[in-house]
Image: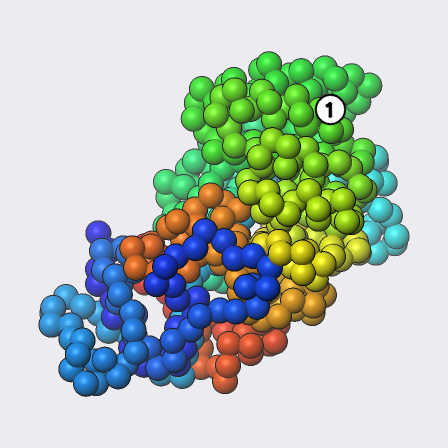
């Protein structure tokens, strides 16, 4: 059971909410509510209360229990933990051999066409036992926890057959049972077409629908269903068939969309009330228009765009249109081998021209929404899960994304327990 923790003398308590919101949209993303010279009380794994240190100094707020651990955060900031709503963190081996191919100028599609990319990861995963896959993935989970992530969505999709997809999803379940962060699982059997189905594309889609989805759903191994709806992968028609099949089993849609081309993935995502549409490097007026007024969260993956040299999505136009925006790491071996959400914040500022306040909203409350957990995570609000981190001493919260190469996290607390 989690103990009680009182954090005092906080230079600034970030992302506080008296009336919690599910997401932050448009121009409101440029504002983050903070309390300077603050305290935060965590009780039984939840955020119990917070306020100004003047309340304690004046005797208007006191804590008498002897079981309270007090942390003096003088000069430090306290943030809600990152919510990373798009990762492929369960994988076998690595793909640094393809890194040189990218440097030589080969495109993502060209590498995939040579049996690299997703198919390479699928081969490695097939040859790796469930226990070894869990061991390798656990190293990465510990890494992102230390970097401030308190909730993570993990996709399958490197199995590409029923047995190996189940192996991945079982590893995701073991992670959920073994680690203190919140974990959501997504079934992504439609990540790529396996080599043996290269000339039988429709047959593989049939296999996903008629064999994989029923087995995955009956074993209660996934929260969401996803499709890589893009050039060279799965068509809008494929995506519609797969999402409809998933919905019959209660699986909430998510979509990989518009990374490589104007694929129609955004449109199909909105049509089927996808929780999020992710990537969006190739997005224009039509995509923005259809997202406005929907409940679908546009989720951008600047680490992947940087690594692959893709165009940056039109974030400023999205925000100006009144859309919310989430940012996620896309942690995977081929196009974004990092789950460092602080770096993602920096890329949001540097590459996407987002304000520091906007990226804070994008990696907390909005990315929590993209995971379906913003009622319990993503901000400092009474009754939410006590997932926070304390920074090292900093001059301002803008310094956090500004110092993009610095390790600025001092203490991680998940479910009201001090992790480090």
- Mark 1 = which residue? 237
Q: Is residue 149 visible in this depiction of the protein? A: no
Instruction: Determine the secondary structure under disc 1.
Output: helix
Q: Above or below — where is 35 with respect to 358?
A: below
Picture quadrant where residue 47 is located? bottom left
> Where, quadrant-wise, is the C terminus in this rendering?
bottom left
Q: Is residue 57 left or right of residue 150?
A: left
Percent position of residue 351, x then y: 72, 65
Any part of residue 105 in sight: yes
The residue shown at (50%, 81%) is 396
Viewer-side residue, 102 vs 341: 341
Q: Label 1: few (<14), some or many (≥20) within 10 Å?
A: few
Q: Position of residue 70 (x, y in %)?
A: 24, 73
Q: From the top left corner, tell me how far across and down residue 308 is, in percent.
A: 77, 53
Name the residue located 48 percent from the left edge and 56 percent from the top edge. Answer: 365
The answer to which of 234 and 16 lies nearer the viewer is: 16
> Residue at the location (46% across, 29% down)?
221
What is the quadrant of residue 345 in the picture?
bottom right
Residue at 63%, 37% (x, y): give it: 270
């Amino acid at each position: 059971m989690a103990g009680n923790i009182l954090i005092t003398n906080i230079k600034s308590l970030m992302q506080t909410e008296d009336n919690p919101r599910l997401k932050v949209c448009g121009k409101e993303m440029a504002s983050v509510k903070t309390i300077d010279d603050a305290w935060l009380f965590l009780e039984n794994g939840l955020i119990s209360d917070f306020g100004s240190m003047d309340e304690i100094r004046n005797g208007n707020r006191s804590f008498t229990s002897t079981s309270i651990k007090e942390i003096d955060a003088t000069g430090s900031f306290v943030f809600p933990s990152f919510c990373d709503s798009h990762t492929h963190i369960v994988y076998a081996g690595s793909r640094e051999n393809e890194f040189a191919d990218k440097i030589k100028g080969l495109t993502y599609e060209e590498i995939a066409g040579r049996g690299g990319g997703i198919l390479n990861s699928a081969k490695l995963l097939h040859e790796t036992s469930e226990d070894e896959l869990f061991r390798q993935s656990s190293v990465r989970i510990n890494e992102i926890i230390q970097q401030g992530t308190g909730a993570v969505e993990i996709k399958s999709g490197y199995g590409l057959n029923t047995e190996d997809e189940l192996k991945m999803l079982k590893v995701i379940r073991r992670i959920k049972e073994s680690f203190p962060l919140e974990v959501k699982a997504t079934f992504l059997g439609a990540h790529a077409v396996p080599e043996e189905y290269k000339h039988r594309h429709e047959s593989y889609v049939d296999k996903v629908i008629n064999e994989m989805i029923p087995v995955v759903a009956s074993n209660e191994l996934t929260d969401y269903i996803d499709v890589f709806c893009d050039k060279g992968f799965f068509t809008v028609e494929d995506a519609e068939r797969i999402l409809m099949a998933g919905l019959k089993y209660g699986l909430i849609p998510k979509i990989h969309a518009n990374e490589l081309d104007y694929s129609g993935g955004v449109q199909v995502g909105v049509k089927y009330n996808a929780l999020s549409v992710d990537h969006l490097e190739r997005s224009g007026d039509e995509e923005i228009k259809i997202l406005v007024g929907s409940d679908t969260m546009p989720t951008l993956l600047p680490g992947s765009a940087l690594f692959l040299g893709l165009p940056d999505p039109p974030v400023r136009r999205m925000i100006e249109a009144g859309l919310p925006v989430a940012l996620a790491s896309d942690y995977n071996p081929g196009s974004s081998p990092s789950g460092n959400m602080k770096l993602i914040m920096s890329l949001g500022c540097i590459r996407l021209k987002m304000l520091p306040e906007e990226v804070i909203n994008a990696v907390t409350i909005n990315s929590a929404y993209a995971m379906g957990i913003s009622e319990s995570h993503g901000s400092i609000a009474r009754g939410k899960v006590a997932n926070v981190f304390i920074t090292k001493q900093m001059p301002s919260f803008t310094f956090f994304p500004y110092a993009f190469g610095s390790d600025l996290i001092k203490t991680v607390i998940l479910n009201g327990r001090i992790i480090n």
